[in-house]
Image (cartoon, rainbow, N blue to C red):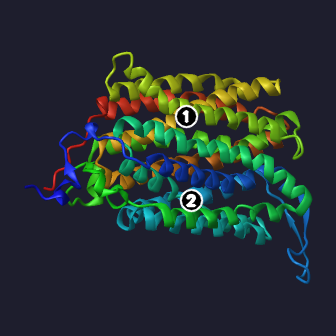
């Protein structure tokens, strides 16, 4: 008679046949909340940037009895570009270690660690007295935030079967849009009533609650299932494999190139849209909220719909990986019209095209993240995703100072054409990335890892 314990983890050969696990959508909900907090933290500075340009700031004490400080903070477009570069260089450096950290400690231990680091860094912005101070605070924010997506993608790979991963990724990735919605609703109100420094402190309590929630609730599927109800089918474990050897596979480079080309555009939207609406249409801190909220509401819908899109294509007879590529091509085509936004004179037409582009990016992001788990076993997904995050952050670190210098130069020449070339690149980047990804990894074929 077979030992019932032997049923606990029956391996199967084809990972595409993995069944769905109970409790997986609660995991997805926790990932969604973490991503929302992550994006609120990174959005605060971009929303406050218009009031930090060319103004004398009187730093009144946070608490009664503390000394007041008077200083001048003049964040020009050029300096803002360099501050963003500090964030993204740190993000790239952090991701190098974050993927390995999460793979070694597991999602339960590694995820709260990186969340705590980025939350402390976000709150430290409240103590800044100079432009260089923002650069330092932003650097440590990038180090912490670099761990969010490697951990989230790894958790998704552990809990979700391949056919559901894009949808699950789309749902938790929609937290990026929700965070970008919450930030322009909350930050201006807090800044106007309690001062700009208080805006950097509001998310700290939510981060603490989330860390406790995750630490108590998250387990690997094998550790959390009720074994008395039967057997659990899991993917076969990967062999020992040096992480750097993953760079020898075209599939890893396909993922990295796709992220390098397109992440810079998303960072550009996140960090520069408040400046765009302020300089192009004269929207100040009290009026900038509705356009930003509109863009990111639609982007949230795009994330979920983009995650569902491969399933829709499979109903037309495509296999899963062809459907994934078709979904990404659809998203790439939807971004193209944003190339015209730099020269528009209608704020709400601009909002409409930006909304479409942001939604398409989120759909693209849900699917390109899932290609990592399509092409590599779950034990290495965190590392591969970290490679892509490094590439994406480096793309942003190159793009943001270029954007800052272009916009500063346009301001010095008293022209509003600075955003034109930036949006042209944004519109074309996804289609180019799709072509390169397909050339490097035809059909998203699964990597055959060898130990020799």
| C-alpha separation, residue under disc 2 versus residue under disc 1 | 22 Å
Name the residue beneath numbered marker 2.
145
Q: Quadrant of residue 127?
A: bottom right
Looking at the image, tell me whether mark 2 or mark 1 is earlier in sequence order: 2
Q: Could you say which disc has been placed on residue 208 in the image?
A: none
> In the rendered image of this protein, does residue 348 appear above or below residue 24?
above
Q: Quadrant of residue 383?
A: bottom left
Q: Nearer the viewer, residue 327 or 412?
A: 327
Residue that protrudes farthest toward the top in the picture:
316
Q: Could you say which disc has been placed on residue 304 in the image?
A: 1
Q: Residue at x 39, y 32 (%)?
A: 436
Front disc: 2 or 1: 1
Q: Quadrant of residue 228?
A: bottom left
Label 1 crowding class (10 Å Cα cut-off): few <14, some 14-19, many 20+? many
Q: Residue at x 86, y 52 (%)?
A: 189
Could one spot residue 425 in this view of the protein?
no
Q: Residue at x 34, y 28 (%)?
A: 320
> In the rendered image of this protein, does residue 240 appear above or below residue 421?
below
Residue 32: x and y in percent read 56, 49
On screen, residue 175 versus residue 276, left or right, reads left
Could one spot residue 157 in this view of the protein?
yes
Question: In terms of secondary structure, where does tag 2 sit?
Answer: helix
On screen, residue 60 versus residue 10, left or right, reads right
């Amino acid at each position: 008679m077979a030992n019932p314990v032997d049923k606990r983890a029956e391996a199967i050969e084809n990972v595409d046949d993995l069944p769905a696990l109970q409790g997986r959508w609660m995991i997805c909900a926790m990932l969604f909340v973490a991503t929302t907090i992550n994006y609120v933290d990174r959005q605060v500075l971009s929303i406050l940037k218009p009031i930090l340009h060319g103004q004398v700031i009187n730093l009144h004490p946070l608490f009664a009895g503390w000394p007041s400080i008077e200083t001048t903070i003049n964040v020009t477009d050029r300096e803002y570009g360099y501050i963003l570069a500090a964030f993204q260089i740190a993000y790239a450096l952090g991701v190098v270690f974050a993927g390995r950290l999460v793979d070694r400690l597991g999602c339960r231990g590694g995820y709260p660690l990186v969340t705590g680091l980025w939350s402390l860094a976000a709150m430290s912005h409240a103590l800044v007295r100079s432009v260089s101070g923002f650069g330092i605070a932003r650097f440590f924010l990038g180090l912490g935030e670099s761990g969010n997506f490697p951990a989230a993608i790894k958790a998704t790979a552990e809990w979700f079967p391949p056919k559901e991963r894009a949808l699950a990724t789309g749902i938790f990735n929609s937290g990026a849009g929700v965070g970008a919605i919450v930030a322009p609703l909350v930050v201006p109100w807090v800044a106007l009533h309690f001062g700009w420094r208080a805006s950097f402190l509001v998310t700290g309590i939510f981060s603490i609650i989330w860390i406790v929630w995750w630490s108590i609730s998250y387990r690997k599927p094998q550790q959390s299932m009720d074994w008395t109800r039967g057997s659990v089918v899991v993917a076969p474990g990967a062999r020992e494999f040096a992480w750097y050897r993953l760079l020898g596979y075209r599939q890893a480079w396909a993922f990295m190139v796709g992220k390098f080309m397109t992440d810079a555009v998303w960072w550009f939207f996140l960090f520069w849209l408040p400046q765009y609406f302020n300089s192009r249409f004269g929207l100040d801190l009290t009026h900038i909220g509705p356009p930003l909220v509109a863009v990111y509401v639609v982007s949230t819908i795009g994330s979920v719909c983009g995650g569902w899109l491969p399933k829709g294509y499979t109903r037309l007879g495509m296999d899963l990986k062809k459907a994934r590529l078709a979904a990404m091509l659809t998203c790439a085509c939807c971004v193209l019209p944003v190339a015209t936004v730099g020269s528009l004179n209608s704020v709400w037409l601009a909002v409409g095209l930006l909304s479409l582009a942001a939604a398409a990016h989120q759909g693209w992001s849900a699917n390109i993240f899932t290609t990592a788990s399509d092409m590599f076993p779950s034990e290495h997904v965190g590392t591969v995703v970290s490679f892509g995050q490094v590439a994406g952050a480096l793309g942003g670190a190159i793009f943001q100072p270029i954007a800052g210098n272009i916009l500063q130069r346009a301001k010095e020449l008293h022209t509003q054409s600075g955003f034109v070339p930036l949006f042209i690149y944004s519109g074309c980047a996804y289609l180019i990335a799709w072509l390169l990804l397909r050339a490097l990894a035809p059909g998203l074929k699964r990597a055959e890892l060898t130990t020799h």
